[in-house]
Amino acid sequence: MLITSLTNKQVKYACSLKEKKFRDLENKYLIEGEHLIEMANPSDIECLFTTDLEFKASYPVIYITQPILEKLSFTKNPQNKIAILKKKVQTLSYDKKHYLLLDNVSDPGNVGSIIRSALAFHIDYVVLSKNSVDIYNEKVIRGSQGAFIKVPIVYANLNEVILKLQENKIPVYASCLSNDTIDLKNIESTDSFALIVGNEGQGISKEIIDLADKSIKIEHSDAIDSLNVSVATAIMLYNLLKK
Amino acid sequence: MLITSLTNKQVKYACSLKEKKFRDLENKYLIEGEHLIEMANPSDIECLFTTDLEFKASYPVIYITQPILEKLSFTKNPQNKIAILKKKVQTLSYDKKHYLLLDNVSDPGNVGSIIRSALAFHIDYVVLSKNSVDIYNEKVIRGSQGAFIKVPIVYANLNEVILKLQENKIPVYASCLSNDTIDLKNIESTDSFALIVGNEGQGISKEIIDLADKSIKIEHSDAIDSLNVSVATAIMLYNLLKK
């Protein structure tokens, strides 16, 4: 099938998934580009739009014209494959070793970069507070370089998650800048941990900090107020894990 | 003076500085927002445009209307102060302890984040290869959160810089993923160092890697090709310094 009309029903449906409210409603999202599509599980791909009339796959392929590709794409220079994926239903379990909790982290580029580091540093679950950014936002997907496909990610009430982690003897660390925090260098080695990082401007909410077992910080020059949250998260994960 | 015309000469001059070729020609650049302007040395500020008719300063203040502010601004929701700054002339000296060299790093967001980490982790000079991104690009400025005002930054031929660093007994490390690299964890402590990081896609050029004393890498899961360059740089700086 070759679609040539910009107002085709399937094209309009795919376009609607650029908006969070439709992604939430349909439990689907878009990914763009060969690299990401190759990382995806083919059984999660509902269909793929391409201008490459030779392309074949195990899932439905819909051939489109360049103007339609440009309409579907997020970028000025669209790649020639865009797919609709079904969201995975992930269930959080407490029998793993490494958890990363994001409290209201709101910049999609930061969240993408954090998910990429989470995959690099063996995080078993990324848990986002419900007011955090939508991980199916295209900037998160792009920033994560596809890592978001491989790391289990859930949205949950962080208070409840922290209590359950503690019941399961997993020490919970909050990344924070207040005075009574422990320098990352002085954190003792543990077999498992959960790390909480917070919003770009406000940090972690006080309620969540109070629930954590320890607050930790990265020592840095006074010349700067704080590190970028994705940079700070990566430094913490690397140094908590390498012990 | 209150300017109301979008085609005013000073407005057009300021606007031209959004382009690299005019910044290079004039040795000036724009910064936007109270926070950045407060970080700047007032003697570097050539003039400031604002819609705040009450604002006074030690440098020339030009009052403008909202449409002009919107024309000058880089963002959809402009802050009400935009300044023209003179570029600082920085001279590289080899009597410091910590150098960070960027070989063709091209994403302005990454370079901004790297400069912010460089300030946080006591880097004395950031040296960019001449094909790297322009540090006066507004995305670099924004991403660095003003750190670029405080860290000495120069553009130079990296080959020459590396040879001079080595003459001055400063060990030069290249961040790289090839097989004969040393794990960051196993790098011995040194009083001073220079770290080289490379382009997002290609890494450091072979010529530069061959000049370095050692190649180092960050161990991470095979599930991902590489870390984001600004994340990798921050992890290396933190761990090289903390020893």
Image (spheres, coloured by chain):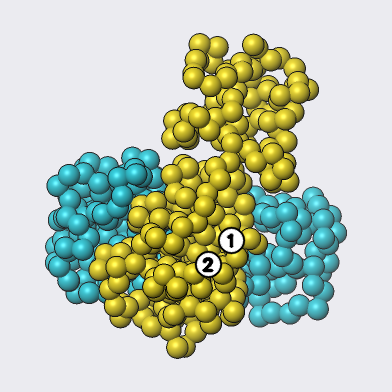
Chain colours: A cyan, B yellow
Tag 2's secondary structure? helix
The C terminus of chain A appears in which quarter of the rendering? bottom left
> What residue do we see at 69% from left, 39% from top?
B26
Does residue A66 appear left or right of residue B192 in this picture? right
Q: Amino acid at mark 1?
A: Ala
Q: Amino acid at mark 2?
A: Val
Q: Which quadrant of the view contains residue A232?
A: bottom left
Instruction: Work out which residue is located at the far bottom of the displayed protein and give it.
Output: B180
* Rendered view: B45 above or below B59: below
Q: Could you say which is closer to the camera, residue B209 or residue A26? A: B209
Q: Percent position (x, y) of residue A53?
A: 82, 74
Can marks 2 and 1 be said to lie on one chain? yes
Mark 1, residue position: B156
Contact between marks 2 and 1 (CB within 8 A): the answer is yes
Does residue A76 appear left or right of residue A101 in this picture? right
Give the CA separation, mark 2 to mark 1.
7 Å
